[in-house]
Image (cartoon, helix red, strand yellow):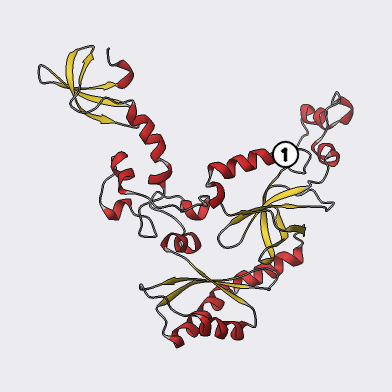
Amino acid sequence: MSILPLPIFEQDADPGRRNGAQTDEQIYAAMKPPTSIVVRYGAKRMVGEFPYDGKSKPGCGSKIVVRTPRGVELGEMLTTTCGNGGCGKSVSRSEVRKYIEHSGGKDYPFTDEGKILRVAEPDDLEIWSRLQASTRARLDRARDIAREFSLPIKIVELEAIFGGELLTMHWMATDESRPDLGALIEAIQAAFETPVVANQIGARDEARLVADYEKCGQHCCCKNFLKVLKPVSMKSAKTQKATLDPMKISGRCGRLMCCLRYEDETYAELAKKLPKKGSRVNTDEGPGTVVDGKILVQLVLVRLEDGREIAVPVEELLA
């Protein structure tokens, strides 16, 4: 069956009938290359803004070869920081800085020390693919070497960067001791013929490196978007009326789930709007005593003087 062209589509494709409107190709051709690019890179998904002086106009998600303080790395473009960049979703530098301030401030893993070398080419992607394919073998070899030293540590990841200048050994202590890793690092350096940097991490950082999905069905927040991992208190769980069963409020790292912390401010604000338990309130059905409250749905359970219990939206309580 042949496909018949529709007149309306034929008219839209005719430059002479566009009344000055530009095609996507014309809009892209008129754009200037960005002067700086925000890139996400590394196993811990660090973020940096780096100057760019190339001719290409990459878009969000493009693979970028960038020189960072660690060496040459392959990262992913998040946005440009200038309005005339090649990506229609670019944001301003002030918006990037504002996001950083709200996401951890000085603790946010952000750097501007480096430079964009080029937009990744097919050969770059092939090299990176081979490097990623060797991740498991590289880690297994490092762990074999570590076992020979009988140190109370666990090597979580041995991260290689695109340029091959550096290996980062992310490790955890398995007891309270402070092991000397000097000999181990020398042995791993000799095995891979590459300088090694040891980076001690905690349980939350381990989840960031190796975990996948949480019990909510989404990617672990620490791996997906949460950059600053701060302690979470049991008070947050109590405020949110979450169960206090450790199996249900703990994440892949074995610690309290991060979402308890970054949702805590919202719960606290909503909780202020609810009357306290035991306080007297008036409703359309008469006065009563507050028995309980539901923070998210903003409902108050009221026991009336005749013994009945009714659920009343907080905005419908009478003064």
The location of residue 210, given as percent across then percent down, is 48, 64
The location of residue 24, given as percent across then percent down, is 79, 37
The location of residue 159, given as percent across then percent down, is 58, 70
Which residue is under mark 1? 88
Towards the viewer: 245 or 173: 173
Towards the viewer: 142 or 195: 195
Q: Is residue 297 visible?
A: no
Q: Is residue 193 visible?
A: yes
* Left or right: 290, with 101 as reference point: left
Quadrant showing the C terminus: top left
Q: Secondary structure at mark 1?
A: loop
Please say if 225 is above or below 181.
Answer: above
* Left or right: 100, with 121 as reference point: left
Residue type at the position of mark 1: Gly
Q: Image point 63% across, 78% down: which residue? A: 195
Q: Image point 53% across, 76% down: which residue? A: 139
